[in-house]
Amino acid sequence: MAEDTIPRRQFLWGAGLAGTAVATGVAPAAAQKQSTNAAPGEAQRAATAPALEPLLTLTPTEHAFIVAAVDTLIPADKLSPSGSECGVATFIDRQLAGAYGNGARLYRDGPFHKAKSELGYQLPLNPREFFRAGIAAANEWSRKTYGKDFDRLPEAAREAALNSMDAGKAEFSGFSSRAFFNALLQITMEGFFADPIYGGNRDMASWKMVGYPGLPATYREDIKKYFGKKYDKPPRSIADFS
């Protein structure tokens, strides 16, 4: 991506500093834009961007968008496989299908006024509704701008589209593109670095990339053994202790 926004993979080194920052206004009607019926091209989406696991809440169109987005943010290279190959799309689907997606821990009584980003989430939509509306708005803007849905764009165009969303220059109908991009970036980072038991970070690819040892909470003996030396033990996840 362009150097004045978020270069690809730059976010990996500052993951702990990112936030959702989705405190801008969203028209409630935006969440209702997607019909319960399959959208045109839905069957083709299912064939061209198959899920590695059965989808819990994302439609084929939404899943295709998420796969394209996470693969643009985390391209396959010498550091790791792509975002979708690491299971990030699976992680996002699971999160949006569960308590997080339903807004279980969000205060959801109004009023919902437009507010500064540092005040946190201030929207009437739960996260599942927010991503549904955001993906629909992103695809609508992509069709107007590039003539195709986001997942059908070539890599360079996808990067440019995400840069426009990041800068808030993508005009979403009744919706903040910057707010959507921030939420998308945050959940992508979470999926890439979370314990593999949640669906992402397949084969602990991100942990191996940064040298994170994983789950064990105490390293008292290893501190003595590896003092001044490289820690060469493979990472371990929750599943390794089940």
Image (cartoon, rainbow, N blue to C red):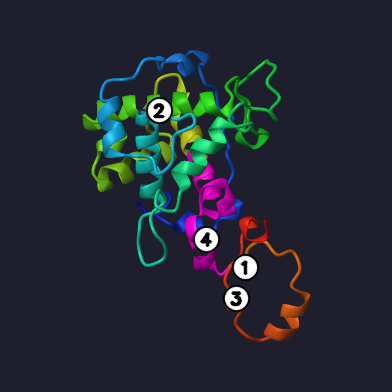
Q: Nearer the viewer, residue 119 or 58?
A: 58
Kindly identify the amino acid type of the residue bearing the numbered disc 4: Met
Rate crowding at label 4 as few (under 14), some (14 to 19) or many (20 or more) other CA atoms within 10 Å. Answer: many
Q: Disc 2 on helix, strand or loop?
A: loop
Please report whichever mark, 2 or 1, sits nearer to the chain's N-terminal start: 2
Q: Which mark is residue 222?
A: none
Please report whichever mark, 3 or 2, sits nearer to the chain's N-terminal start: 2
The outermost residue toward the left is 147
Q: Is residue 176 above or below residue 202?
A: above
Is residue 233 something that shows in the picture?
A: yes
Marks 4 and 1, how far apart in space? 10 Å
Q: Quadrant of residue 75?
A: bottom left
In the picture, the quarter occupied by the C terminus is: bottom right
Q: Which mark is residue 59?
A: 2
The outermost residue toward the front is 242
Kindly identify the amino acid type of the residue bearing the numbered disc 3: Lys
Residue 109 horizontal/vertical position (percent): 70, 17
Marks 3 and 2, how far apart in space? 40 Å
In the image, which residues are magenta? 183-211
Rate crowding at label 3 as few (under 14), some (14 to 19) or many (20 or more) other CA atoms within 10 Å. Answer: few
Kindly identify the amino acid type of the residue bearing the numbered disc 1: Pro
Q: Residue at x 48, y 33 (%)?
A: 180
Please report whichever mark, 4 or 1, sits nearer to the chain's N-terminal start: 4
Q: Which residue is mark 3?
A: 233
In the figure, is residue 136 to the left or right of 214?
left
Q: Which mark is residue 204?
A: 4
Q: Which mark is residue 213?
A: 1
Q: Disc 4 on helix, strand or loop?
A: helix
Q: Residue at x 64, y 18 (%)?
A: 112
Q: Are marks 2 and 1 in contact (CB under 8 Å)?
A: no
Residue 46 horizontal/vertical position (percent): 31, 33
Q: Are marks 3 and 1 in contact (CB under 8 Å)?
A: yes
